[in-house]
């Protein structure tokens, strides 16, 4: 039986296996994902991002507890694009310590970004799709860091939560500028720390400067103290409010269209490259091109043009 | 006359124009780059990365001053991948204030990541190639942030400098873990601040845990106070030591081979995608696929496979 069929029957180990295959970039995973695809689209996906040290993991842990009390099944994908070399060991360790690790209603998977050809956002979405097909009601995608990778990833979520902490100082301004546009909710965590009021005020001011269309969702700034479970119920209520807004306003259609477009394009990019590159590699052409480049005898721009001319049939 | 020919004759405005075209992702830029390619490979490229607020810009400014005193021409590429939405405005403002802005021996360009299809590292390298062909002796690539994008970019440099500051606290550990492997030199900037000794010691300890091959370059940890020009001469001397090591050990061959491979593959990915996607878009197929995905009638994995089967000639 295919892994996908086992997964649809509730086999947890088959799911873990497929996610590992996805992370490793195995081509066979694509066939499994084909089978799962019609069973996806039911989970609500929450993206959580913010700088290292903002307490995102504790927040995810507390959110999970609330959703579990509501009887919902929760999938967690922890993505660590800042550690291309350590293979996500830090996340892995942390996850093993998670108090939900033994709860059958919670499925946790860390992505080590090993097979990240085609974009980390793609493998993250593939893993989220597996969780979706497994019947998880909520899928939480947590990223470490605030770069382009993280932006790409959290854009795939229905609701995006940006987590900040007081006292990171002016240095964080540059980061804020980049992620203000992607947050549906802003959380100032560790809100008992000095400077929390100021951080909340600054965020609110920056958000007020944004232009919103009539009827658009207005991002809110919340306070939490995740380590002692303060503000979590309020956060869950706001996530619910955002979800309602998405569906009642009809914005969900536009969101899904953009998301599907991105998923398709990422996949197309990856498969095109793999297809062409394998041939070049096998027939020795690749080595010849590199030698030509080293001697400045051949430029990469012309080499690629030649390959395109040879390999493509005209499109209609 | 082509832009490239004007650039080879020393036309600064033509160079600025081509770099803008590269940043905007114009296809015409590829033809210019073809002409410039045989004239590249002479500049020594220095990559500088580190968290926001580490004082990288001031450091670049001081490095530039030293190289100018040596009579070298310096190109600076400032890349800001953390701000996909602000369009690099922060960098742009800063660059205009740079004291070297009126020096004809210094050429500064910020990359706003607008046309970043095919990878920001590719457009960065294209811009560095233009500067190389212009006859810049040193090209400094400065990135903001420490994510995968930045890692990809600084890997293209002959020497990579990772800039840290004291007092960012334990939160920075996760970042350190990821970038330890890419640094040829580590700089603790703002070394007059409290905690500098500790940061230097921690970095040194972490580096000591790495396994180095016999004869390999051992990354060093330096202190600078860029704002008052302390430690800069020493840093330039260490960069020179690393450059000598690269050539004397023969490691330069391996480095260039890997770099050329990455340049070629990034370009191949981008051009393949552009070629296929334009057709899909024009003939309505793209819309049909998205509609199929929305209805869960078609999965993206099968859609991409069909396209590959139709458009590709068999390779040999």
Image (cartoon, coloured by chain):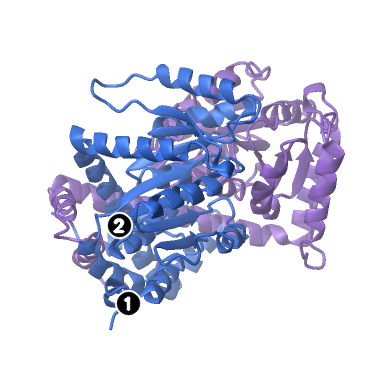
Chain colours: A purple, B blue
**Rendered image: mark on residue A275:** none
Badge 1: few (under 14), some or many (20 or more) residues near its Cα, within 10 Å? many
The quarter of the picture where residue A64 lies is top right
Image coords of residue A181 (percent x, y): 68, 55
Chain bearing tag 2 is: B
User: Which of the two residues, A300 or B79, is positioned nearer the viewer here?
Assistant: B79
Label 1: which residue? B3
Question: Of label 2 and label 1, which has the lower sequence position?
Answer: 1
Horizontal relation, residue A273 to residue A61: left or right: left
- Above-or-below relation of B269 to A85: below
Horizontal relation, residue B129 to residue A54: left or right: left
Image coords of residue A274 (percent x, y): 30, 48
Residue A307: in sight, yes or no? Answer: no
Q: Describe the element under mark 2 as helix, strand or loop.
A: helix
Q: Which mark lies nearer to you, 2 or 1?
A: 1
User: Which of the two residues, A123 or B261, is positioned nearer the viewer here?
Assistant: B261
User: Which of the two residues, A29 or B217, is positioned nearer the viewer here?
Assistant: B217
Residue found 62% across the figure and 56% down from its top: A256
Q: Residue furthest bottom?
A: B1
Image coords of residue B125 (percent x, y): 36, 56
The quarter of the picture where residue A236 lies is top right
Horizontal relation, residue B282 to residue A103: left or right: left
Label 2: which residue? B268
Asked if both marks, 2 and 1, belong to the same chain, the answer given is yes
* Badge 2 vs badge 1, beta-carbon distance below 8 Å: no
The N terminus of chain A appears in which quarter of the rendering? top left
Residue found 56% across the figure and 45% down from its top: A147
Q: How many marks?
A: 2
The C terminus of chain A appears in which quarter of the rendering? bottom left
Image coords of residue A168 (percent x, y): 71, 37
Q: Describe the element under mark 1 as helix, strand or loop.
A: helix
Residue found 64% across the figure and 44% down from its top: A42
């Amino acid at each position: 039986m295919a892994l996908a069929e086992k997964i649809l029957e509730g086999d947890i180990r088959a799911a873990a296996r497929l996610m590992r295959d996805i992370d490793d970039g195995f081509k066979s995973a694509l066939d499994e994902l084909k089978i799962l695809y019609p069973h996806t689209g039911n989970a609500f996906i929450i993206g959580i991002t913010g700088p290292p040290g903002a307490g995102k993991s504790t927040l995810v842990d507390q959110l999970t507890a609330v959703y579990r009390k509501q009887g919902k099944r929760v999938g967690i994908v922890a993505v660590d694009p800042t550690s291309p070399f350590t293979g996500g060991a830090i996340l892995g360790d942390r996850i093993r310590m998670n108090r939900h690790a033994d709860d059958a209603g919670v499925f946790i998977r860390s992505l080590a970004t090993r097979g990240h050809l085609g974009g980390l956002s793609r493998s993250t979405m593939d893993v989220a799709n597996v969780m979706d097909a497994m019947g998880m009601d909520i899928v939480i995608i947590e990223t470490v860091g605030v770069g382009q990778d993280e932006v790409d990833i959290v854009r795939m979520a229905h609701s995006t939560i940006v987590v900040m902490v007081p006292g990171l100082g002016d240095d964080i301004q540059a980061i804020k500028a980049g992620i203000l546009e992607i947050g549906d909710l802003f959380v100032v965590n560790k809100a008992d720390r000095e400077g929390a009021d100021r951080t909340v005020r600054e965020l609110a001011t920056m958000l007020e400067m944004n232009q919103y269309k009539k009827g658009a969702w207005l991002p809110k700034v919340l306070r939490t103290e995740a380590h002692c479970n303060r503000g979590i119920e309020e956060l869950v209520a706001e996530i619910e409010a955002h979800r309602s807004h998405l569906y009642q306003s009809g914005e969900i259609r536009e969101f899904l269209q953009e998301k599907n477009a991105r998923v398709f394009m990422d996949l197309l990019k990856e498969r095109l490259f793999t297809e062409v590159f394998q041939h070049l590699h096998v027939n020795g052409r690749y080595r010849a091109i590199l030698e030509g480049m080293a001697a400045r005898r051949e430029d990469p721009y012309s080499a690629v043009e030649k390959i395109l001319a040879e390999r493509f049939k005209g499109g209609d």
